[in-house]
Amino acid sequence: MILGDLGAEVIKIENPKVGDDTRTWGPPWATNKDSNDLSTPESAYFLSINRNKKSITVNLKSPDGIQIVKDLVKKSDILVENYIPGKLDKMGLGFDELSKINPQLIYASITGYGQTGPHSKRAGYDVVIEAEAGLMYITGEEDRPPAKVGVAITDLTTGLYANGAIMAALISRSKTNLGQRIDCSLIECQVASLVNIASNYLISNQEAKRMGTSHPSIVPYQVFPTKNGFIMIGAGNDKQFKILCHTIDKVEFLNDSRFTTNSDRVLHRKELISLLEQRFKDETTEHWLSLLFDKEIPFAPINNIKQTFEHPQILAREMIQEVDHPKAGKIKLTGIPVKYSREALKVRLPPPTLGQHTHEILSDLLNYTNQKIDDLKANGVI
């Protein structure tokens, strides 16, 4: 999707009968605009991750289906796949085979565990990798069971790493005129994303623990209860802590040797947090938000999703985009988060219906005749 946002023509290859599994991940659904259309609506999940793509349906169990993919490879810059290692090789669609057809092809493999190693043949799922690669262990409240992150963050992180890798491979190809294989896995990207938590263990053998919203190395840096809700406060350095103390009328904290530096505050975390919790409970969230607004200190309310999309900054940055979907009519999608000075990115294409572009791609890109396309359809290939 990111490549599509940047202007690439993205061709999504789907199973002719059911398509991408996420099409059925509902409710919620986007209601069909035609009341006489009794087919299954598109899921909100599918719509969230498939803008700026075209969909074709191909039966990869058919030799003719395999040939369609090979014909597409001849005209493509990049292939992205997430099969278990070795599966596409058996189908004649592995990197070695396809790089003979197109030596400039960038072949990006995204798997659970990578192409090598004792676990390489295992299927990978976001929540499983969250559990296996440390993230779930450190997520949640200290005295509660492990929790998963609210979105499939390991999937998203891996997609971002893969996007960067593809960009680097394109730059390399511009110099060497050769493509290459990218081996990107959920588990490695998740381990890399442990960042400072990983370093704490590798450098000092310090095991991590669940800490809710607080930070292992910075105090105060967490959510506090107020008279009527919650507020997130971050004092990332001594200057910000000083501002916080003055703002909440607790300057006496600055004269307490337990709280002089961040290191002191980390050592005396429980005492300081207890005092701050008492103070923040004295007033409403709205009171604290107004008081902190013009101060040089990180703070935020705990917004729900409705409040998030009503946020004036989100609206100003056009992070809600409305598009016309062929089946669902007008729908709203999350906008594109990166802005460029030379050209404004936009949602050029709504998420596709299943096989919406099959005839277009086979005819216009691959120059298949109408008769050949009809035969492929009659034989269950597309």
Image: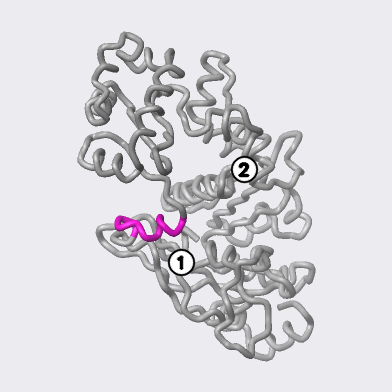
Position of 370 with respect to 78 (left or right) is right
Name the quarter where the C terminus is drawn: bottom right
**Is 29 located above or below residue 329 in the figure?**
above
* Secondary element type, mark 1: strand
Position of 24 with respect to 322 (left or right) is right
Q: Name the residue under label 2.
A: 186
Circle nearer the N terminus (2, 1): 2
Q: What residue type is labelled 2?
A: Leu
**Is 205 located above or below residue 55 in the figure?**
above
Quote the CA–CA distance across marks 2 and 1. Answer: 26 Å
Position of 121 with respect to 277 (left or right) is right
Place residue 118 in its image quadrant: top right
Q: Where is residue 159 in the image (x, y as percent from the top left)?
A: 54, 50
Q: Where is residue 8 in the image (x, y as percent from the top left)?
A: 45, 65
| Residue sitting nearer the eye, 50 or 106 | 50
Q: Which residue lies furthest to the left in this view?
A: 294
Please say whether residue 377 is visible from this viewpoint.
Answer: yes
**Which region is colored magenta?**
305-314
Q: Which amino acid does label 1 sit on?
A: Leu
Q: Name the residue under label 1.
A: 333
